[in-house]
Amino acid sequence: MSILDNKVTVPKPVQGTPEASGEFDDLLALMARLRADCPWDRKQTNHSLIPYAIEEAYELGEAVQSDDDEDIKGELGDVLLQVIFHCQMYAEQGRFDMSDVITTLQEKLVRRHPHVFEAETLKDDAAVKIRWDEIKLEEQQTREARGKPKRRLDNAKAGSALMQAQDVQNQASTLGFDWDGVAGAVEKLDEEIAELKHELTDKSIVEIKANIREVEKELGDCMFALVNVARKLNLDAEVATLTCVHKFKSRFGYIEEQLALSGKRLEDSDITEMDALWEAAKQHERSS
């Protein structure tokens, strides 16, 4: 459609209360209606949706691991929602529409599978991977020809922020941009924490919020530096953080269980009682 005639089609909002038809065009019309009439959907931007797209991808992975059909259908739908949501907004901006996205994907799939659609013969999946990488290199050369040069750190894999940070640091290290040992990374971490403290110490919440973007940058620098420490210790920052998340959830679950035994809910407790139970949870971990 628009790739051929350079026209972007913005879906028309569905009228009334739609039924679930299973038709893709009806889904696009439903998304258009949400953008028109839902205050939350209307205020979103392509940038504001980034965390949701990442979250939905992770939740899909968990659903596949669970092997529950209803969960998988739901999470696949949530991932698809992110695709149509982005496409709706880009269409509103007059940049491209869903037809362009589908056409681009179709062209890429055909281009990257010459052993399926052309005369090429590849004997196994290893050969397919080699050919795939060759084609991706050709695609990058095409990108460079239209003014999109590839930088050395562009090889970093997509993933969570922690995963990307560690991979970027590894890539830079192979090019000689690194400390010899962990001491330099720890010193950098101390430096970044000091800068974050400077943005927060002796300031009211109003002052902090007025300068929140600078605080965000300093906080990001701290996290990036901490990932560097993990890398220098040959630890996976993502795994270390997930371990902490699971530990926190386990201890908080212990608090909830102990309160329930007393006939209380979390909402009925206070920070003093929860702190005491938190320490009890740590003791329980050591004894079990």
Image (cartoon, rainbow, N blue to C red):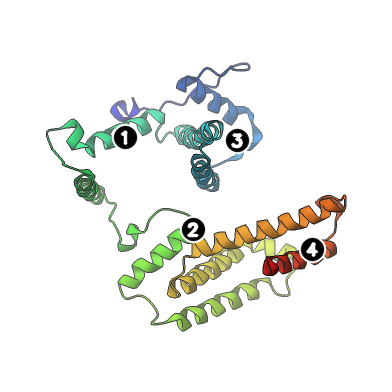
Kind of residue sitting beneath label 3? Asp
Kind of residue sitting beneath label 1? Thr
Residue placed most toward the observer, 67 or 156: 67
Tags 4 and 1 in contact by the CB under 8 Å rule? no
Q: Secondary structure at mark 1?
A: helix
Q: Is 126 placed left or right of 202 in the picture?
A: left
Residue placed most toward the observer, 26 or 199: 26
Q: Secondary structure at mark 4?
A: helix
Residue ID for mark 2: 161
Question: Height in image: 184 above or below 85?
Answer: below
Residue ID for mark 3: 41
Label 1 neighbour load within 10 Å: few <14, some 14-19, many 20+: few
Q: Is 84 placed left or right of 268 in the picture?
A: left
Q: Can you say which quadrant of the picture contains the N terminus?
A: top left
Q: Secondary structure at mark 2?
A: helix
The picture places residue 214, in percent across and down from the top left corner, at 59, 65
The picture places residue 110, in percent across and down from the top left corner, at 24, 34
Residue ID for mark 4: 277
Which circle's residue, 2 or 4, is located before the other in the chain?
Answer: 2
